[in-house]
Image (cartoon, coloured by chain):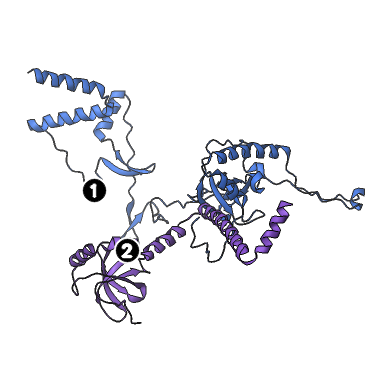
C-alpha cells in the first residue's frame, strides 16, 4: 500500500515534543530533510521551524499556496474548519483522555481504581455466565439442582 | 457672591475636619511669609555655605543610624544666650596649634623644624560604620518554613517510618516545624504523631478542619519521649532474674485526646460529599503500579 501522508505544504501535523507539545500546526515549507517551517495561527503557535522528529503527520491537509503567509494559512484553516475536524477525530479524543488521566490527583486515581474494579467484576460475571451456558451447560444444571435441593 | 460664600464655608468646614499637625501648620506659615517676602522683593537669600572651608554653621553628621543636620551656634548667638541668662560667657579655650615650628640648633639642620603637637592616629577605619553580619542564632530559634501545599486539612501520604505508605490527615504545624497528623486511628491505626515535612507527600485533597479543636496541651513537649529502661542498679537482687522489657504504652491522657480529636475529624469526613470513597481512601495504602512514576504523577 502506498504512503498517503507526506511532509508537504498544507499537511496538518500533531506536535509531540517541545514547547508547543499537544498542539496541531500546518507545514508551510520544508527547510531541509530534518526540519520544516510550520505555522499554527489558530492554535497559538507562531510561524517557526520544527524538527520532523518532533512531529506526527495527521490525515488532514489544508490547501494554501506554497510558502503562503500566516494570513493565507489562517484563511485555509478556517475554510477547512480544521479545529472542529480535529476535535472530532479519535486521535484528539485519545490525546485529551491521556492528558486528563495524567492530571488526576491521588484521591481521584483511587476513585477510578475502585470504579474499574466494580466494572470488571460485573463484566467477568457476565462473561462467566455466558461461558458456562454455552460450553458446560451440565455444570449449570448441576448447580441449579443443588440450589433447588 | 452666594457661591463664593458657600465655597468659603465649605473650605472652612473642610479645614475643621482635617486637623493639621502643629509642625505642618508652622511650616505652612513659614512658607506663606516667604512667599509674601518674595512677592514684595524683601526676601533675603542666605549665602551659600562652603562645607569644605570649615566656616560652615552646620554640618552633616552620622548620628544614631541616620545622617542628620547639626547646627553650630554662631558666636553672636552664644553671647546673646549668655547675656540673656546673666551668666558669664565661658570662652572656649583656644585650640593648641597642631604644628609648632621649633628652632633647631646645630649646623646644616635647616634651623627650624615643624613638630606635631598631637600624635597622629595609628589606625584609620576603612568604613565609617562597619557592617554587622547577620547571625541566625540558635537552631531552636530558627524560622521554620513549611511547604505551601501543606496546609491544615491536607491528606498526606507518609513515606517513612512504621506507617509508611499510609494516608493521614494533617492537623497543623507545630513550633518546631514538624507536622501534627492523625489517621484517624480507627481507619488506619495512625495515632496523633509528628512527622517531618520531608517525609510526606501532600495531596490535592483538602478537608475543611477549621471546626476541629485540638487540645492546647498537644505541642512538641507533649510528644517528648520518656525513658522506658532504667539502668539496673548494682547489687540489685531483682536484676538476677530475667525481666520483661518494658514497651511503650500510651497514657490515658493520650488515648483520651486521640478520641476527642478523631471524633471531630470523623464528623468532618462524614460531611464530605465523597465520604464513602474518602473512608476507603484513608484506610487503604498508597502504592505504585506498572508505568506509574512518582515524578510524573500529580498528587
* Subunit ID for the residue under disc 2: A
Residue A43 seen in render = no
Residue B34 image offset from top left, x and y in percent = 15, 31
- Subunit of mark 1? B
The color chain A is rendered in: purple
- Disc 2 from disc 1: Cα separation: 84 Å
Nearest-to-viewer mark from 2 and 1: 2
**Is the same chain shared between marks 2 and 1?**
no
Kind of element beneath mark 2: helix
Q: Is residue A85 above or below residue B169?
A: below
What's the mark number on residue B53?
1
Could you say where residue A107 lies in the image, as x and y percent from the top left? 53, 52
Rendered location of residue B156, percent (x, y) = 56, 51
Q: Is residue B200 above or below residue B249?
A: below
- The answer to which of B297 and A121 lies nearer the viewer is A121
**Which colour is chain B painted?**
blue
Crowd class of label 1 (few under 14; some 14 to 19; many from 20; radius 10 Å): few
- What crowding class fits label 2: few (fewer than 14 Cα within 10 Å), some (14-19), or many (20 or more)? some
- Left or right? Give the position of A9 relative to A134: left
Q: Which mark is residue A86?
A: 2
Residue B46 at least partly seen:
yes
Which of A52 and B121 lies nearest the eye of the viewer? Answer: A52
Say what secondary structure mark 1 lies in.
Answer: helix
Q: Please give left or right for residue A48 compared with residue B154 in the image.
A: left
Q: How many marks?
A: 2
Residue located 71% across and 53% down the image? A147
- Confirm or deny contact between disc 2 and disc 1 (CB under 8 A): no
Residue B207: percent from left, percent from top: 52, 43
Amino acid at each position: 500500500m502506498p504512503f498517503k501522508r507526506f511532509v508537504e505544504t498544507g499537511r496538518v501535523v500533531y506536535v509531540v515534543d517541545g514547547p508547543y507539545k499537544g498542539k496541531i500546526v500546518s507545514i508551510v515549507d520544508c527547510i531541509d530533510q530534518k526540519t520544516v517551517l510550520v505555522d499554527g495561527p489558530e492554535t497559538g503557535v507562531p510561524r517557526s521551524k520544527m524538527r520532523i522528529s518532533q512531529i506526527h503527520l495527521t490525515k488532514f491537509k489544508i490547501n494554501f499556496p506554497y510558502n503562503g503567509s500566516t494570513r493565507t494559512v489562517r484563511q485555509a484553516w478556517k475554510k477547512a474548519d480544521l479545529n472542529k475536524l480535529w476535535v472530532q477525530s479519535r486521535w484528539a479524543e485519545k490525546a485529551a483522555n491521556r492528558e486528563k488521566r495524567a492530571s488526576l490527583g491521588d484521591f481521584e486515581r483511587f476513585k477510578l481504581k475502585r470504579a474499574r474494579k466494580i466494572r470488571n467484576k460485573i463484566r467477568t460475571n457476565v462473561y462467566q455466565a455466558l461461558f458456562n451456558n454455552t460450553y458446560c451447560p451440565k455444570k449449570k444444571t448441576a448447580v441449579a439442582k443443588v440450589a433447588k435441593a | 457672591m452666594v457661591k463664593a460664600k458657600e465655597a468659603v464655608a465649605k473650605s472652612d468646614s473642610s479645614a475643621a475636619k482635617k486637623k493639621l499637625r502643629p509642625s505642618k501648620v508652622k511650616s505652612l506659615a513659614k512658607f506663606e511669609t516667604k512667599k509674601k517676602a518674595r512677592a514684595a522683593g524683601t526676601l533675603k537669600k542666605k549665602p551659600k555655605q562652603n562645607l569644605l572651608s570649615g566656616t560652615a554653621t552646620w554640618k552633616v553628621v552620622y548620628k544614631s543610624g541616620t545622617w542628620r543636620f547639626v547646627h553650630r551656634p554662631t558666636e553672636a548667638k552664644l553671647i546673646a544666650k549668655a547675656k540673656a541668662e546673666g551668666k558669664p560667657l565661658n570662652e572656649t579655650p583656644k585650640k593648641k596649634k597642631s604644628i609648632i615650628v621649633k628652632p633647631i640648633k646645630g649646623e646644616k639642620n635647616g634651623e627650624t623644624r615643624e613638630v606635631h603637637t598631637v600624635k597622629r592616629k595609628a589606625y584609620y577605619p576603612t568604613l565609617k560604620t562597619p557592617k554587622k553580619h547577620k547571625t541566625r542564632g540558635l537552631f531552636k530559634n530558627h524560622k521554620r518554613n513549611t511547604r505551601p501545599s501543606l496546609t491544615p486539612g491536607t491528606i498526606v501520604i507518609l513515606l517513612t517510618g512504621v506507617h509508611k505508605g499510609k494516608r493521614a490527615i494533617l492537623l497543623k504545624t507545630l513550633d518546631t516545624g514538624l507536622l501534627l497528623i492523625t489517621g484517624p486511628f480507627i481507619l488506619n491505626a495512625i495515632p496523633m504523631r509528628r512527622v517531618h515535612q520531608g517525609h510526606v507527600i501532600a495531596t490535592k485533597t483538602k478537608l475543611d478542619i477549621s471546626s476541629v479543636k485540638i487540645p492546647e496541651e498537644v505541642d512538641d513537649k507533649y510528644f517528648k519521649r520518656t525513658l522506658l529502661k532504667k539502668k539496673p542498679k548494682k547489687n540489685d537482687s531483682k536484676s538476677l532474674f530475667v525481666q520483661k522489657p518494658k514497651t511503650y504504652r500510651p497514657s490515658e491522657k493520650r488515648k483520651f485526646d486521640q478520641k476527642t480529636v478523631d471524633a471531630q475529624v470523623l464528623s468532618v469526613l462524614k460531611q464530605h460529599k465523597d465520604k464513602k470513597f474518602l473512608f476507603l481512601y484513608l484506610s487503604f495504602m498508597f502504592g505504585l503500579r506498572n508505568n506509574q512514576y512518582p515524578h510524573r504523577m500529580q498528587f
